[in-house]
Amino acid sequence: MEVRVSEDKAVEDAGVFPPITPPDDEVRERAIARHAQLTKPAGSLGRLEELGAWIAACQGTCPPKPFERARVVVFAGDHGIAAEGVSAYPSEVTAQMVANFLAGGAAVNVLAAAAGATVRVADIAVAGETAPMVSKYKVRTSSGLIDREDALSAEETAAALRAGREIADEEIDGGADILVAGDMGIGNTTPSAVLIAALTGTEPVAVVGRGTGIDDQGWIRKTAAIRDALRRARKVGADPVGLLRTAGGADIAAMAGFLAQAAARRTPVVLDGVVVGAAAMVAEEMAPGSREWWVAGHRSVEPAHTVVLDHLDLKPILDFGMRLGEGSGALTALPVLSAATKILAEMATFADAGVSGGPTTPSDALTPPPAPEPQAAPEPPPAPTYTVAPPLDL
């Protein structure tokens, strides 16, 4: 007899991921030990050493291999809440920017080329028409007005999650050894702020930023929209799929599926700013432990992004005052990761270079120097003795 999976079960399964296994700690320790053997004072390269050890642990080999296929995926989608005046730009800019990406004229294109990466654009919910090459996984156009209605239906949420998972699989199967997640969507910082506040218990005013550069009146409108959407979202509780449906959007849901699937496939990801950060928080709820496979490329000026970094316990590589999105901050940080990888892989050891001063064995790098032996307290000097002279006969 044929067994058919119900539609409800298919929707439910879209947010279910296999257990996430962390990067290889044994390899990380070997990388730390190797750093101590390289021709430099131990620890003198600071965070670069930590990042190189993380890449080695993700690859499961030390020394790590230089990146051969870095891929940026920009998830594009419009948001109905933009109609409430929460952005400085009209919604048609999203489709126009997708065309700009394809023409190679955007910041993401320039930064990707500088970092040795290539760009893929995925139209998940753009309101306008886009080229067939980017709309394969399109779920719908735009999203609901999240201050009064759900962003997506249950079926659309599941379709977006599956889209993100399949995009991750396609990229990894195609040879990607490090991924960057980027975003494009007018109004997308508003649902992102709602998701972040809902998952952390943060008040609306603490997560509202200027986005694309709104003025004071726009900030007030955005705060009100986030407040009203958050009231609806908090009724869902901590259910990540429910939050995506209620207050997210198809592009954010696809990003969440992409990030969780990359972790399940043991592939490192460089995170960008607040929108990708919101998707990452949802992904971590769906697939606990995914964050071990991510590094924060930068800290955005959006206040909600600091909430994300604190919640996920991620330390950003850069803090350049950026707030563009598109994957721009992550791509600016990617050359730092490449340098960290190459230092660990290509720098000479003390032994190879014939330089004195290195540890005598690899294990020396992991063993702290012995504590000095306690010194015995000095004996007190002998008490002085006095001789009393006999009295004089006068």
Image: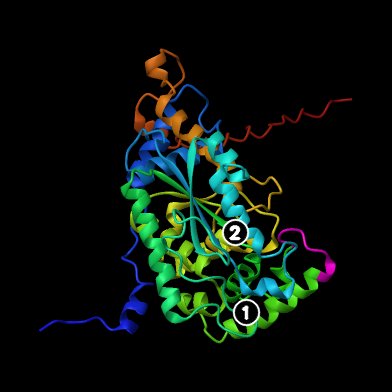
Magenta span: chief secondary structure: loop
The three-letter code of the residue at mark 2 reads Ala
In depth, the one of 255 and 136 nearer the eye is: 136
Identity of the residue drawn at 25% across and 81% down: 5
Q: Residues within 10 Å of mark 2 (few under 14, many from 20)?
A: many
Classify residue 222 by image quadrant: bottom right
Residue lying farthest top? 354
Image spot of residue 202 (x, y percent): 65, 73
- Of mark 2 and mark 1, the one earlier in the sequence is 2
Residue 215 is covered by the magenta coloring: yes
Residue 39 is covered by the magenta coloring: no
Identity of the residue drawn at 57% across and 54% down: 98
Task: Give the labeled residue for mark 1.
Answer: 145
| Left or right placement of residue 339 versus residue 286 in this view | right
| Left or right placement of residue 268 versus residue 93 in this view | left
| Left or right placement of residue 226 versus residue 364 in this view | right
| Tally of marks | 2
Give SS at disc 2. Answer: helix
Range of residues picked out in magenta: 210-217
